[in-house]
Amino acid sequence: MKINKVKKIAAFSLIAASLLVSSACSNENASSDEKGKKEEISITFRSGGGTNKGLQDWLQKEVIPEFEKEHPNAKIKLAPLNVSEGDYFAKIALMLKSKNTAPDLVTEDTFMVNSDASAGYLESIDDKVEDWEDWGKFTENVKKGVIAEDGKVYGVPYNTDSRGIWYNKDLFAKAGLPVPWEPKTWEDILEAARTIKAKLSDDVVPIWMNSGKATGEATSMQTFEMLLYGTKTPLYDFDAKKWIVKSDGLVNTFKFIDTVYEEDLGPELSQVLNGQGGSVAYQQLMPKGKLAMGIDGIWQTGNWQETGAAPWPKAFETLGFAPMPTENGDAPGSVTMSGGWAFSIPKNSGNKDLAWEFIKFASSKEKNLSLLLRDRSLTPRDDVAQDPEYQKIPMFEEATDLLQDAQFRPAVDKYPNVSTQIQSLVEDVVTDKLSPSEAAKKYQENVTDIVGKENVMTK
């Protein structure tokens, strides 16, 4: 019995030893495989129709190759979404919910940062920016766009912007309008549009404003809010912490939009209610001398440079960029909405450390300057703003001056829902489904339902 017991022990020892050897070999092979395997991260942003062409070229041709050279074990994959602006935010929200679909790095419009952070979709980078010396070189006002209601940072801005009225100086001169053009009130804008319509050919669109659901936040911000914030009643009262759901400003904003389309001063509805409306306006009509005015942002200059979606050598000889006046010329006299985009790390990112390393690399002074020379948006970095090469960019002096009176969208989590209502109601006014007063009433009802009766007020 003892002999059998010894044999059993010996046999067990041999099996255990062989398993250990096998395991060691297996681990050694795994280590070898891991050494040759690259860490991969994906970056998602909106593309299509010339949108973000400068950003995509910058990532593909410059930033990614240089980053991968510095990080030999890293592999950066682009995962753009070829969708309309309105659809981008909806698709991103769905993607961020799951580890199976979330990218490792995402570009966030700053108006969505607080909402996505509150929903648990984004990773706070508070501790990371504290140890990053470059963070102190970002403009304080711009940083507010990536700080959520919990006071934490959820992204690094890579651009900011301002908005005004693009106008074709040649068309204005032909119509007998003054150049430079300096409108003081909303009525000045409408009178210029009426003059264009009366004096020039029918194929010239007097004024373009994003006006439908398909153009998403562009309708809310470039059109509705550029008007509303020129009244005495913005969207939100920060002192009372309540939404303003009834005011003369709301009614008058809808009236202005209605007047443009009732008097046939705007584009065809088939053009403006299209998700690619912005591309139609600034890549087709404006370069061809078929658009007299457009309320939009400074980034449109990126379309017209040599490497842009619609190269236009004479763009900056032909165009002016006028400040958007307040409704009746009240102080401060003009208004601009400001926003921008940021690099954020999803909560479900598979490699947050590498994503952060990439953000730091892409957000350096050198790289941010390089992006904005391509992309033609305003910089979020104070040091880039002082760079002589940056200051030479056409129209940037005018656009930067507008930031002095800049207004920002409410950084509260219900804003995206309210914005969706704005887009829908603007389209209803444009298509004659609702009158301006009916739209204002509907706005009051819908926003109250969204945010709750205790969070609204009238002015």
Image (cartoon, grey):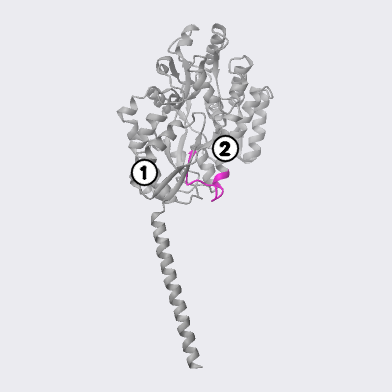
Label 2 to label 1: alpha-carbon separation: 34 Å
User: In the rendered structure, which amino acid carries the disc numbered 1?
Assistant: Phe
Q: Is residue 107 magenta?
A: yes
Location of the C terminus by quadrant is top right
Q: Residues within 10 Å of mark 2 (few under 14, many from 20)?
A: many
x and y percentages locating residue 40 in the rendered image: 44, 49
x and y percentages locating residue 153 in the rendered image: 44, 45
x and y percentages locating residue 211 in the rendered image: 59, 25
Q: Which mark is residue 57?
A: none
Give the residue at x 69% y 24%. Answer: 433
* Mark 2 secondary-structure assignment: helix
Give the magenta range.
94-108
In the image, residue 291 above or below residue 250: above
Give the residue at x 66% y 23%. Answer: 431
User: In the rendered structure, which amino acid carries the disc numbered 2?
Assistant: Pro
Circles 2 and 1 in contact, beta carbons < 8 Å: no
Q: Which mark is residue 67?
A: 1
Give the residue at x 44% y 70%. Answer: 22
The mark nearer the N terminus, 2 or 1, is 1
The answer to which quarter of the image holds residue 236 is top right
Which residue in the protein does label 2 denote?
416
In the image, residue 384 above or below residue 106: above
x and y percentages locating residue 155 in the rendered image: 45, 43
